[in-house]
Amino acid sequence: MELLSNAPIPDSLPASMTLLREKPRLGVPSRKSAPHQRIDERNCTAVLGLRFPCSETVSGTVVAPNNAACNIQRATSGVMAAANLGLAVGKGFALGGAVAGLGATGVGAPAAAVLAVYGTVSIFGQGLTGAAQLYSAATGNYGTAAGVAQIGNILSGPVSGLGTLLGGGSLAAAEGNAGYESAFTAGAGLIDAIRAGGAGLALAMADHNTAQMSLFGAGGGNACGAGH
């Protein structure tokens, strides 16, 4: 049998093979496709000069959140974190002195015990909130950290906050009621400091201002985008 090594090759065969090697073939995407692909519609021109719409896969990314809003939120969280952590330390020293003063007399011992429990829970809640806010300010993460801050806010006003939860209320309702309690006690503390001739006025004023800012949701929300 004679080999057809000298048989002429049709001119259309190389062109056809070239078309077969093109990717994607007949609209079938390549095996190596990038994640998060979108379809980019554009006009394609065939070999014969015919124009028709075709699809081309191009890589894309998720739209980033508003960086300006996120940066503002993180800065606000940083300010609130510094205030809450500083107040937790300052109020801790003040609580120790107050409890010691009440406990020095037999009549004030029960009141000292109540003040110690209430103050300890409230201060712990404020410190917990400050730590969570500091983490969010540093990382931009407002997922789990926001939940921790919410628990801290509830503990900051323990009577109303925990009372709402025990009554079957939601975390949001408990946080709101605790915020009113914190604002009330901070306001009362500011009034007492003014009446006392300014003793502890700076701490009381800072506590009052921070409570008001927390009540109106300073540093809340999630401007840094989903998944943070």
Image (tube, rainbow, N blue to C red):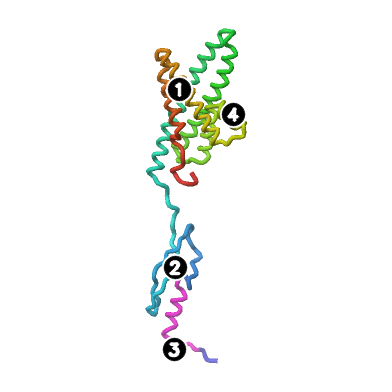
Q: CA distance from mark 2 to mark 4?
A: 60 Å
Q: Earlier in the sequence, mark 2 or mark 4?
A: 2
Q: CA distance from mark 1 to mark 2?
A: 65 Å
223 horizontally vs 158: left or right: left
Range shown magenta: 4-22
Task: Determine which of the numbered discs, if any, sits on residue 55 in the image.
Answer: 2
Residue picked out by circle 4: 163
Residue picked out by circle 3: 8
Q: Count residues near mark 2 (Cα–Cα under 10 Å), then give few for <14, some for 14-19, many for 20+.
A: some
Residue 133 spot, x, y in % from top left: 47, 34
Residue picked out by circle 1: 187
Tell me the amino acid under the disc marked 1: Gly
Q: Count residues near mark 1 (Cα–Cα under 10 Å), then give few for <14, some for 14-19, many for 20+.
A: some
Q: Is residue 7 a member of the stretch shown in magenta?
A: yes
- Residue 71, by quadrant, is top left
Tell me the amino acid under the disc marked 4: Gly
Q: In what element is the residue under mark 3?
A: loop
